[in-house]
Image: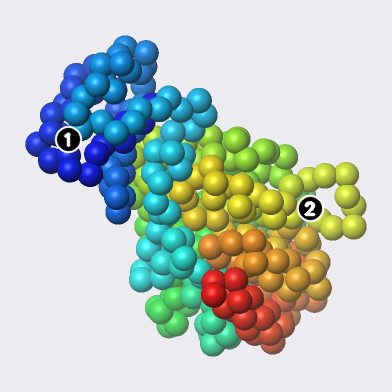
């Protein structure tokens, strides 16, 4: 349930109303907009007398929310959320490009890529230290050593870093990681999501390869219900009957998620297509569709990459893509 307060409502009147809601055992979420204050109620709202609430002089309107996701719901929070990653803002008109290798392989590799993608306009460095792989015989990542190499690249370039977590027990290793990524395979790892909800870290959560948008938002709700509202959604393609691409990039998810939720939406065209030659058109299309950012895989030698070389751009290719994406951004934001 949400209650919209009138503009002239005093802080004392608002606080009195909040205390009344809390006395009924309801969790209260406040969203301050330019013109309205929205009070969101989570819990058993059946005990709230809507007629009585609507009769109050400070109430403009009252609505029940049928969707099971509350904190992520735009009805609770009309204004776009803006996630600040060390001064790099995502959402609310702010656009960032996240770039880097699928896996951190060695010192020279991550440093060279970090320097190259930054020079081309990327603002956040990605790199996998823990890698969930379909085959147990494939490269699983450098783990703690990979995080250390990312931190070295961060110190050298000044770029914030993002890396994927796979297990709750590794959380302490991510203390200096600026965005913790929840991968598609862990989108419904609810114990992990609840633990991340108890942190104040920025979290990027990827849509599962066979999950719908409601399920993505419900997984997000696990994080936000724990008190952590620093969440970024990521569309990375879903599994369909198509076999020419690794996944099917659902670009309709971008405007749909913006309609349903106030959270920023980033698109990963690399995992979505699995083919480096398709990254450019899909990245441009994602920018045109209103994405708040892109996550693109870049490797200095894709042919010899230990993970996902087929979908990785070279630094020169990334430079070209980044320039074209920014031109699309300029065109659609006029």
Q: Residue 298's spot in the image, x, y percent? A: 66, 74
Q: Secondary structure beneath disc 1?
A: helix
Residue 156 is left or right of residue 301, and the answer is left
For mark 2, what is the residue?
Answer: 247
Q: Residue 20's spot in the image, x, y percent? A: 18, 22
* Way the structure is coloured: rainbow
The tag earlier along the polypeptide, 2 or 1, is 1
Q: Taking the image as drawn, is residue 80 in sight?
A: yes
Q: Answer whether labels 2 and 1 touch (C-beta < 8 Å).
A: no
Q: Secondary structure beneath disc 2?
A: loop
Q: Residue at x 57, y 85 (%)?
A: 120
Quarter of the view holding residue 112? bottom right
Q: Residue furthest left?
A: 12
Which of the two residues, 137 or 35, is positioned nearer the viewer here? 35
For the N terminus, which image quadrant? top left
**Neighbour tally class for label 2: few under 14, some 14-19, many 20 plus, Cα within 10 Å:** many
**Neighbour tally class for label 1: few under 14, some 14-19, many 20 plus, Cα within 10 Å:** some
Residue 128 is left or right of residue 139, and the answer is left
Quarter of the view holding residue 333? bottom right
Q: Say if 15 sits above or below 206 in the image.
A: above
Q: Residue at x 65, y 49 (%)?
A: 253
Q: Residue at x 53, y 34 (%)?
A: 218
Q: Residue 168's spot in the image, x, y percent? A: 47, 42
Which numbered marker is on residue 34?
none
Q: Say if 8 sits above or below 123 in the image.
A: above
Q: Residue 23's spot in the image, x, y percent? A: 19, 19
C-alpha gap between disc 2 and disc 1: 48 Å
Residue 191 is left or right of residue 120, and the answer is left
For mark 1, what is the residue?
Answer: 14
Q: Residue at x 68, y 38 (%)?
A: 211
Give the number of the mark in front: 2 or 1: 1
For the C terminus, which image quadrant? bottom right
């Amino acid at each position: 349930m949400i209650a919209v307060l009138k503009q002239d409502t005093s802080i004392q009147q608002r606080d009195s109303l909040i205390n009344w809601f809390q006395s009924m055992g309801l969790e209260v979420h406040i969203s301050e907009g330019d013109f309205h204050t929205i009070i969101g109620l989570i819990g058993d709202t059946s005990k709230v007398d809507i007629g009585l609430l609507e009769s109050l002089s400070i109430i403009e309107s009252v609505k029940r929310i049928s969707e099971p996701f509350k904190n992520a719901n735009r009805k609770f929070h009309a204004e776009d959320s803006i996630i600040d990653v060390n001064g790099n803002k995502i959402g609310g008109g702010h656009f960032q490009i996240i770039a880097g290798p699928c896996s951190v392989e060695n010192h020279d590799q991550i440093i060279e890529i970090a320097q190259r993608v930054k020079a081309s306009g990327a603002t956040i460095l990605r790199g996998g230290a823990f890698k969930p792989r379909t085959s147990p015989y494939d490269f699983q990542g450098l783990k703690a050593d990979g995080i250390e190499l990312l931190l070295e690249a961060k110190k050298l370039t000044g770029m914030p870093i993002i890396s994927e977590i796979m297990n709750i027990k590794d959380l302490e290793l991510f203390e200096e990681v600026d965005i913790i990524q929840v991968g598609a395979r862990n989108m419904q790892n609810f114990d992990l999501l609840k633990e991340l909800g108890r942190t104040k870290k920025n979290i990027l959560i990827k849509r599962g390869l066979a999950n719908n948008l409601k399920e993505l938002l419900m997984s997000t709700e696990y994080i936000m219900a724990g008190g952590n509202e620093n969440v970024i959604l990521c569309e990375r393609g879903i599994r369909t009957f198509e076999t020419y691409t690794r996944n099917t990039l659902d670009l309709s998810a971008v405007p749909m998620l913006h309609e349903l939720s106030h959270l920023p939406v980033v698109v990963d065209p690399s995992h979505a297509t699995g083919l480096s030659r398709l990254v450019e058109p899909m990245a441009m299309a994602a920018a045109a569709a209103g994405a708040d950012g892109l996550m693109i895989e870049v490797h200095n030698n894709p042919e010899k990459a230990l993970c996902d070389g087929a979908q990785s751009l070279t630094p020169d290719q990334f430079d070209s893509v980044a320039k074209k994406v920014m031109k699309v951004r300029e065109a659609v934001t006029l």
